[in-house]
């Protein structure tokens, strides 16, 4: 209980620091959102104070002292009110994120979990069967796949399986004629469009999990307690999973917490290549259009998701390794 309360207190303190930094950074940037909006309008001649005030009021630019802005900002964060998007005006930031977030969670989140589970199990198998083809094929294949960056693998799949073979769609999350609903037809259409982005993320991330788990597992297999378990005549599966893999998985679990937290940020390059309407593509548009409210909300959401994932990993650490609770 003491360990859990300590982790919770650290989480709350780190969360407050992240929210505060997210408030300060945009205000340190040169210029103002009103200037950027006026410049996009192509205004000729001098800008009057009345025009500037009208644009600031329309965009919801905060005013008053820095402390009052900070208090108002905290209130907005608690109520998930991040204002109006500059580039998608008059849509709200919360509405835009709410529309994009499910696509990223379903695609990137599902594929990341599958890659972690499959890569970890293949790493355990490779370490247990080290020196055999069951070790060589996953490790060499994993190293080969990890050498390709996300966007290059995505472009290869788009060209060969999309344009040349015509087997899969090359962009979007569903057909242009389809309307999002909860029917099996739309679900099948969305799943069909998600195959190429999903395969891209799976292929480029699977190798890292295999190699990480395999290397840690090999070191764990040399420990005395593993040798003692084997000498007592325990089944190989029991020794591999309950003794060696349980301790070897801890570093992989830490990495999984970081990656799982980054799922909310989406795979920006993959979503951009496939024009997939997730958080990654939304962040790309926010940065290119200098949409500060949208960028601020997305950065905060990504930071909070990483903190939550790390907190969950800390709790799991205490369950898997009782020594961390001391």
Image: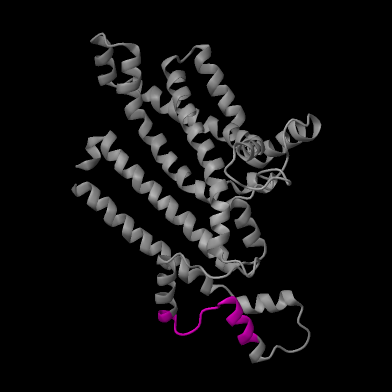
Residue 130 coordinates in the image, percent (x, y): 45, 15
| Looking at the image, residue 229 lies above or below residue 160 | above
Residue 287 falls left or right of residue 320: right
Going 70% across and 88% down the picture, which residue do you hit? 47
Q: Residue furthest front?
A: 183
**Image: 95 above or below 138:** below
Work out which residue is located at the far right of the displayed protein and give it.
164
Q: Would you place residue 150 above or below residue 235 in this image?
A: below
Q: Quadrant of residue 173?
A: top right
- For the record, the magenta segment spans 52-68
Question: What secondary structure characterizes most of the magenta part?
Answer: helix
Magenta segment: does it hold 54?
A: yes
Left/right placement of residue 312 relative to residue 149 reads left
Q: How many marks?
A: 0
In the picture, the quarter occupied by the C terminus is top left
Counting from the top left corner in percent of width and height, residue 15 is at 37, 60
């Amino acid at each position: 209980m003491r360990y859990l309360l300590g982790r919770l207190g650290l989480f709350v303190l780190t969360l407050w620091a992240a929210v505060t930094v997210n408030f300060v950074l945009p205000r340190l940037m040169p210029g103002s959102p009103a200037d950027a909006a006026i410049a996009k309008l192509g205004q000729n001649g001098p800008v009057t104070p009345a025009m500037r005030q009208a644009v600031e009021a329309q965009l919801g630019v905060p005013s008053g002292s820095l402390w009052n802005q900070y208090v108002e900002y905290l209130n907005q964060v608690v109520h998930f009110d991040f204002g109006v998007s500059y580039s998608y005006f008059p849509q709200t930031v919360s509405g835009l994120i709410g529309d994009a977030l499910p696509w990223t969670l379903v695609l990137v989140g599902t594929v990341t979990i599958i890659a972690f589970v499959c890569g970890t199990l293949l790493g355990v198998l490779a370490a247990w069967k080290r020196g055999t083809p069951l070790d060589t094929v996953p490790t060499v294949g994993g190293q080969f796949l990890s050498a390709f960056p996300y966007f290059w693998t995505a472009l290869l799949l788009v060209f060969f399986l999309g344009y040349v073979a015509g087997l899969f769609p090359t962009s979007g999350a569903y057909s242009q004629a389809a309307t999002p609903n909860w029917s099996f037809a739309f679900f099948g259409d969305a799943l069909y469009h998600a195959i190429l982005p999903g395969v891209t993320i799976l292929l480029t991330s699977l190798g890292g999990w295999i190699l990480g788990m395999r290397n840690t597992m090999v070191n764990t297999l040399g420990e005395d307690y593993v040798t003692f378990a084997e000498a007592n005549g325990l089944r190989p599966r029991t020794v591999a999973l309950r003794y060696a893999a349980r301790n070897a998985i801890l570093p992989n679990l830490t990495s999984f917490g970081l990656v799982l937290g980054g799922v909310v940020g989406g795979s920006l390059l993959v979503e951009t290549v496939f024009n997939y309407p997730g958080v990654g593509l939304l962040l790309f548009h926010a940065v290119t259009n200098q949409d500060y409210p949208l960028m601020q909300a997305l950065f905060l959401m990504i930071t909070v998701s990483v903190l939550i994932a790390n907190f969950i990993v800390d709790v799991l650490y205490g369950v898997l390794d009782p020594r961390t609770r001391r």
